């Protein structure tokens, strides 16, 4: 049995725009529903939602036949957390709060087996199709995608060094945390923050590294795409449900 292909990773490598959706409902049914919507990638979040490993297994199973590749966000850039989501079959990980090249190297090392990294060894988990991918331990890296989040002024100051780390496939800019870091908490649309977002993508393009971002504002999303962001999440399952429910209720209740 062959190693599953990571369409998201290969699309990024080819420079193809990847449109995504954030998933925080912790529901395999909700994840399956949006997996057939035509998105290229879905973030299964554990940093800011009450998702745990057993929940993620069901969500990964649910999205497996949809159009979108799953990207799992562990709660932190932590070797144990990363190991657990890789073993259950996540091929792409989005790792929060990477501030410098050393932290980026640590992130990559957590996804690589020795001697190239520190990932604990098992060949019998879901990632290896329960032991059926005979060469999984030797080939796993080929289909793993490591995305790191730059979400502070310090991270932006180090962005070229972070992007240059071998094994980093893309750098995700976190607008909300960056806004807070720049003194404009709750205002990702502030001109200072927007200028920093433009600076970040320009610098990443200059070194040939894909840049990612999240916004629920359609005009912002289109602007970010025009700037050159390559993997762009354009909303969230929570946002879609809340907006749809609010609109429906308001249409009847005035």
Image (tube, helix red, strand yellow):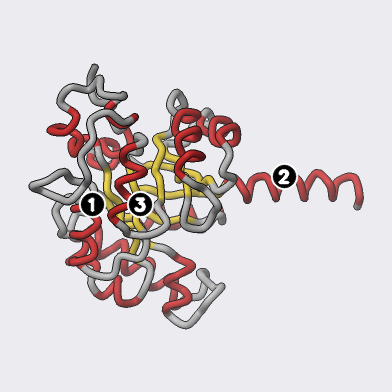
Q: For the residues labelled 1 and 3, say whether their Cβ atoms are less than 8 Å apart.
A: no
Picture layout, residue 98 above or below residue 179? above
Asked if 21 appears above or below 217 in the picture, the reply is above
Give the residue number, with chain letter if any, for mark 2: 244
The mark that comes first in sequence, 3 or 2, is 3
Q: Which mark is residue 88?
A: none
Asked where in the image residue 213 lies, by quadrant, the reply is bottom left
- Return the mark for residue 81: 3
Name the N-terminal-most of marks 2 and 1. 1
The answer to whether 176 is drawn above or below residue 8 in the figure is below
The CA span between labels 3 and 2 is 34 Å
On the image, the x and y values in percent for residue 103 come to 23, 65
Residue shown at 45%/43% (left/top)? 53
Q: Position of residue 27 (x, y in %)?
A: 58, 39
* Residue at (43, 27) in percent of width and height: 64
Q: Regarding mark 3 in the picture, which secondary structure is present there?
A: helix
Q: Which residue is mark 1?
A: 110
């Amino acid at each position: 049995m062959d190693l599953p292909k990571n369409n998201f990773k290969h699309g990024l490598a080819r420079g193809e725009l990847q449109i995504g959706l954030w998933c925080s409902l912790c529901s395999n049914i909700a994840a399956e529903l949006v997996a057939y919507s035509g998105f290229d990638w879905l973030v299964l979040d554990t940093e800011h939602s009450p998702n745990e490993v057993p929940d993620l297994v069901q969500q990964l199973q649910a999205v497996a036949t949809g159009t979108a590749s799953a990207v799992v966000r562990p709660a932190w850039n932590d070797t144990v957390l990363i190991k657990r989501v890789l073993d259950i079959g996540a091929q792409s990980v989005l790792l929060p709060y990477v501030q410098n090249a050393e932290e980026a190297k640590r992130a990559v090392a957590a996804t690589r087996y020795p001697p190239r990294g520190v990932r604990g060894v098992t060949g019998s988990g879901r990632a290896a199709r329960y032991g059926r991918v005979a060469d999984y331990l030797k080939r796993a890296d080929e289909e793993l995608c490591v995305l790191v989040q730059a979400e502070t002024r310090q991270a932006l100051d180090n962005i070229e060094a972070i992007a240059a780390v071998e094994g980093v496939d893309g750098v995700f800019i976190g607008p909300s945390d960056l806004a807070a870091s720049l003194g404009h908490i709750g205002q990702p649309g502030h001109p200072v923050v927007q200028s920093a977002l433009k600076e970040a993508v320009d610098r990443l393009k200059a070194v040939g590294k894909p840049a990612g971002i999240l916004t629920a504002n359609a005009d912002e999303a289109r602007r970010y795409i025009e700037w050159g962001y390559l993997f762009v999440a354009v909303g969230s399952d929570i946002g879609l449900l809340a907006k749809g429910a609010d609109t429906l209720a308001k249409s009847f209740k005035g």
